[in-house]
Image (cartoon, grey):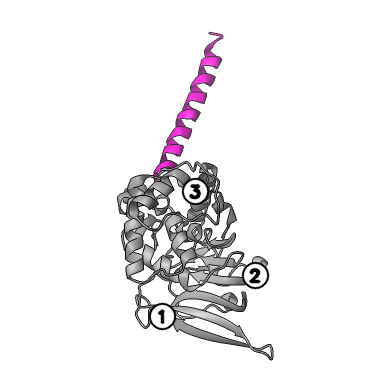
Amino acid sequence: MKDRPIRIEVRRKRLRMDRRHVLLGIAGTLLTRPATANVPTAYDPNAMPAMDSRAGFIDWMKKNRGEDAGFLGQRWDRFQDLLAHKDVWDQRDKRAYLMTPREEFVTKANLDRAYEWHYLDIGYGVTITGPHSVARMTNSLEIKPGDKVLEIGTGSGYQSAYLSNLTDKVFSIEIIKPLAARTRALYDALIAKGYSEYKAIHTRNADGYYGWQEEAPFDKIIVTCGIDHIPPPLLQQLKPNGMMVIPVGPPGAQHVLKVTKHQEADGTFQVTRADIYNGGTLSFVPFTKLEGDAIKGTHNGP
């Protein structure tokens, strides 16, 4: 009977290992990452994928990014729609779209719908914004290399991944704690696979209404949820002559505004607004506000 404690300990270890495997399995089900690529070449911010043909694009991306040909074909097809609808026009923004694997940021249940026009559910009552809105909002910001960009609403992580192909200074806030943790883990997993551009993404679990004061000011700010006014803290954290893109309006009918903070010769500031959809409205879920420990409303992450 002397071996009984040993057997019990072995059994306990097995139970702990089985429990760990179950938990990892649950986490794997919740994670959005389908693990479709291992990047074979180092990231080069100046490298341009082929844009002259579908086959050329797929071949270049398979060779340089190691991504799945099926998803690459879907990405190219959506790219043609983006061009047709004038949702992307700058060469660097075209590259940013083509270099960002949207399939890594949708849930496994929606993997075959990754490049559809509309938003998709990612859990926690939130969504990944459709590629057309992401492209137009991002291109409207005119992001330059080295710009410091703040994103309000990390969500799935797709928007920040897109931004990291435009600048090496991306700061993103997510208010839903488990979602923030999940997306941070996804970034880290993708970095380990070779997506080194995502090292530029700094994340924080906080109330985005108040911005990120410790890292302010920002050259550009992008807000991915609807609100009936421009949060004063975000405007304050915008650099002189900086730009913000934000959906403003009543629930279900927001105008996506490009807000520019101009500095006059006398040092005063003037704020101008332009509607990037020329009067058309979109439906974004409400901006999440944190009051005490309670989360009010829901949040639409890109």
In the picture as drawn, the residue positioned furthest to the bottom comes out as 266
**The residue tagged with tag 2: helix, strand or loop?**
loop
Is 18 in front, or is 194? 194
Q: Where residue 167 sits in the image (x, y, percent)?
A: 57, 62
Residue 99 shows in the view = yes
- Res 63 quadrant in image: top left
Instruction: Tell me the kind of residue under disc 2.
Output: Ala
Residue at 52% across, 72% down: 142
| Residue at mark 3 to residue at mark 1: CA–CA distance | 32 Å
At 41% across and 45% down in the image, what residue appears?
Answer: 62
Numbered label attached to residue 249: 1
Q: Indicate the position of residue 55 as horizontal and vertical percent values.
A: 34, 50
Q: Main secondary structure of the magenta part?
A: helix
Disc sitting over residue 216 in the figure:
2
Q: Secondary structure at mark 1?
A: loop
Which residue appears at 59% of the width and 84% of the height?
A: 262
